[in-house]
Image (cartoon, rainbow, N blue to C red):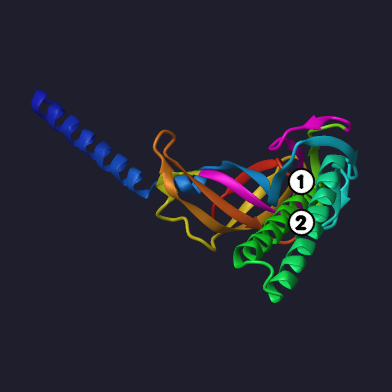
Amino acid sequence: MSHADRFLRNVLSGMALLVLMACGYAQTPVTSGMDRQEIRAQLRPLRYTTLSAEIGAVVQTILVKEGQRFAAGTPLIKLDCGLHDAQRAKSVAELAGAQRSLEANQRLAELNAAGLMELDLAKNAVEKSQAELRISETQLSKCEIKAPFAGIVAEQRIREQQYVQPGTPLVDVLDDSGYELEFLAPSTWLSRLRVGMVVRINIDEVRRNGTARIVRISPRIDPVSQSIKVTANLEGHMADLKAGMSGRLQMP
């Protein structure tokens, strides 16, 4: 075989190999990142809050302990409000005196023995006393911390006989009747994420599978992580769930 024939055969063999490789590459299915990627999701209660003191007082009694359940409106903590109770009694007495003074000035005005200024001052005194009584009653109502919804005490932040200032966190409460999933999805998923879409979740702690329906998609993308916050409500009932549990979430 001549040198030219060998060269031609090598060229044809190389071209055939390239054609076979191209065909094989074209037949290989392309899997998108969304189809194969799993992300982490965390359970969060539908309602939760931290109840704080609105007045300065000593914690007298903690009526519902950490881990105990309660109904909506149940008193959870009672503060020692002897000072506020005395202030209310003082306001009641001052209002009674202002009302008697007003009645006396009204009788004198009927007899032309009192001027309009004295009568107006007596009326203003009654209105002022009524306002101070409302303030005292409002402060007194803050002495009993009540549950804003039915749920469970997640964390007790204070102890009995402890003095608390206004704004001091007292107790964390949550509604564990239902949970929602919160996760950070890559921003590249945004074109395919839709409210109402159903996703699958495997909860690690209880080793159970379930589904959740997307209810909210954040309008803002985090520029650092290039991710977007998504919230989904769990569907059906899964026992033994607790806030803070996490799992692997799979998109359809």
Report which residue position mark 1 lands on: 173
Q: Residue at x 76, y 56 (%)?
A: 149
Marks 1 and 2, the one that precedes in the sequence: 2
Nearest the eye: 186 or 70 = 70
- Amino acid type for the residue under numbered disc 1: Val
Q: Where is residue 197 shown, x and y percent of the image? A: 54, 61
5 left or right of 111 in image: left
Q: Residue extending furthest left?
A: 4
Q: Residue extending furthest top?
A: 3
Residue 149 numbered mark, or none: 2
Nearest the eye: 53 or 193 = 53
- Amino acid type for the residue under numbered disc 2: Phe
The count of marks equals 2
Mark 1, secondary structure of its residue: strand
**Magenta-drawn segment:** 160-184
* In the depicted structure, whether residue 211 falls above or below residue 39: below
* In the depicted structure, whether residue 215 falls above or below residue 113: above
156 left or right of 195 in image: right
Q: Quadrant of residue 167?
A: top right
Report whether residue 145 is seen: no
186 left or right of 41 in image: left
Q: Residue at x 73, y 33 (%)?
A: 165
